[in-house]
Image (cartoon, rainbow, N blue to C red):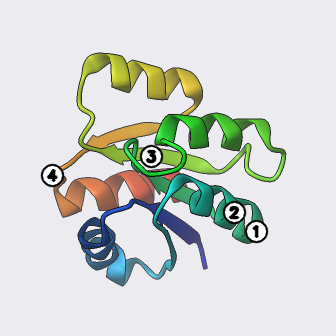
Amino acid sequence: MKKILIADDNRQIRLLVNVALRNGGYEIIEAEDGEDTLEKAVAQRPDLILLDVTMPKLDGFEVLRFLRKRPETTDCHVVMLTTAAQRRDVERARQEGAEDYITKPFEAHELREAVERLLS
């Protein structure tokens, strides 16, 4: 079973993502800030992380940079799922190693398609 880590400080967003991915047969892990995300990513080694940019303690870009440097997480797929929709944010995420970028509010089918594409 593939593991997905949802990293977002907003409980409602984590719930919406859970609902969108419910029937995919994934094991879902949740984190509510940047430090929590890093701890769970290293300990649980998810196959994919859905990562918000704006989070307490460490932002999504800091988390992404750390993930790409650690041998345990370097090959983990990362999709930014965020309200930060400016072109420079998208470009920065891609430069840092994110494989996809989805802006909130998101369409459930768009999220499922991105997840399925990366995990297939």
Alpha carbon of mark 1 to alpha carbon of mark 3: how far? 19 Å
Which of the pair 20/34 is nearer the observer? 34
Lower sequence index among marks 4 and 3: 3
Asked whether, in this view, residue 96 is left or right of residue 38, the answer is left
Q: Residues within 10 Å of mark 2 (few under 14, many from 20)?
A: few
Lower sequence index among marks 1 and 3: 1
- The answer to the question of whether label 1 and label 3 lie on touching residues, with beta carbons closer than 8 A, is no
- The answer to the question of whether label 3 and label 2 lie on touching residues, with beta carbons closer than 8 A, is no
**Is 98 rendered above or below residue 19?**
above
Going 53% across and 50% down the picture, which residue do you hit?
57
| Residue placed under numbered mark 4 in the picture | 105
- The answer to the question of whether label 4 and label 3 lie on touching residues, with beta carbons closer than 8 A, is no
Going by the numbered disc 2, the residue's amino acid type is Glu
Going 21% across and 60% down the picture, which residue do you hit?
109
Going by the numbered disc 3, the residue's amino acid type is Val
Going by the numbered disc 4, the residue's amino acid type is Pro
- The answer to the question of whether label 1 and label 4 lie on touching residues, with beta carbons closer than 8 A, is no
Question: Is residue 53 visible in this depiction of the protein?
Answer: yes
Q: Which mark is residue 39?
A: 2
Lower sequence index among marks 3 and 2: 2
In this view, which residue lies farthest toward the front? 57
Alpha carbon of mark 3 to alpha carbon of mark 2: how far? 18 Å
Q: Residues within 10 Å of mark 3 (few under 14, many from 20)?
A: many
- Mark 4 or 3: in front is 4
Asked whether, in this view, residue 38 is left or right of residue 111, the answer is right
| Residue placed under numbered mark 3 in the picture | 79
Label 1 sits on a secondary structure element that is helix
Residue 12 lies, in percent from the top left, at 24, 71
Q: Quadrant of the N terminus?
A: bottom right
Q: Which mark is residue 43?
A: 1
Label 4 sits on a secondary structure element that is loop
